[in-house]
Image (cartoon, rainbow, N blue to C red):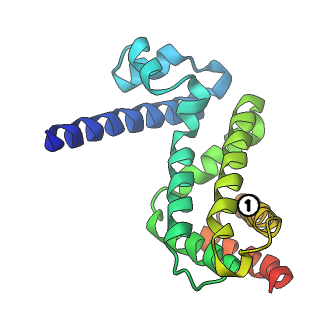
Amino acid sequence: MERSVGLRERKKEATRQAVHEAALRLTVEHGFDHVTVEAVADAAGISRRTFSNYFTGKEDAVLYGEERQIGELVRTVRERPAEEGAWTALRAAVAQFAERLAPPKREWAVRTRLAMRHPSLLARQLANHAALERDLAEAVATRQDHSTDPVRPLILAAAFLASLRIAMRMWIEEDLAREPAEVIDEIMGEMGRSFG
């Protein structure tokens, strides 16, 4: 039974990924405003109803890769050694995370550019980031350097995400000239001086 559940979950994940890739590709080719849910479903080889089983709208389909990465980043922070300070754990987690996700760098840039141009995508992305900020604050709150201070984890999570946004914007403005990890590390280093 476990094997069939595992297979079923893998098939669902493959369908989600196919829909996400179709939505992203069609949005890049035709513009977000000219892409319909029906077109995405057709491109992914599924029905409109099946699309609705996986995503509530085209915004969710386009940003799905980011949502998956958000969950992965939070897990990576939680798995860092308990003796690490919060900022050190956040920095190490993002470096480890960026290393594992090296191939889809172009997708990061595409999603960021799309969100900057389309208010509905930006709104969805901001909602994702608000959830990420909350989850990261919870993850760093358990570290020994914050056991009694309820505000500091919130500030660290917000500063960490601000650093990532600045780094991604710089990376895009530099026309992807450097590796994203290099830009992220530079900005994290600057921000980290404030949290020493």
The image shows residue 170, relative to residue 21, as above or below, that is below
Q: Tell me if residue 29 can be seen.
A: yes
The image shows residue 138, relative to residue 147, as above or below, that is above
Check disc 1 and report the residue beneath it: 161
Image quadrant where residue 143 sits: bottom right
**Local secondary structure at mark 1:** helix
Q: Which residue is drawn at 81% across and 81% down?
A: 195
**For this view, does 152 lie left or right of residue 36?**
right
Q: Tell me if residue 179 can be seen.
A: no
Count up the numbered dots: 1
**For this view, does 168 lie left or right of residue 152?**
left
Q: Which residue is drawn at 43% across and 31% down?
A: 19
Q: Residue at x 76, y 42 (%)?
A: 116
The image shows residue 171, relative to residue 48, as above or below, that is below
As drawn, the residue found furthest toward the right would be 194
Q: Residue at x 59, y 70 (%)?
A: 94
Report the front residue among 127 and 15: 127
Report the front residue among 36 and 49: 49
As drawn, the residue found furthest toward the front would be 148
Percent position (x, y) of residue 96? 51, 73
For the C terminus, the image quarter is bottom right
For the N terminus, the image quarter is top left
Image quadrant where residue 11 sits: top left
Percent position (x, y) of residue 45? 33, 22
Percent position (x, y) of residue 8? 24, 35
Percent position (x, y) of residue 129? 70, 48
Q: Counting other residues with Cα less than 10 Å from the Cα at mark 1, is it few (<14), some (14-19), or many (20 or more)?
A: some
Please name the amino acid that badge 1 sits on: Leu
Image quadrant where residue 160 sits: bottom right
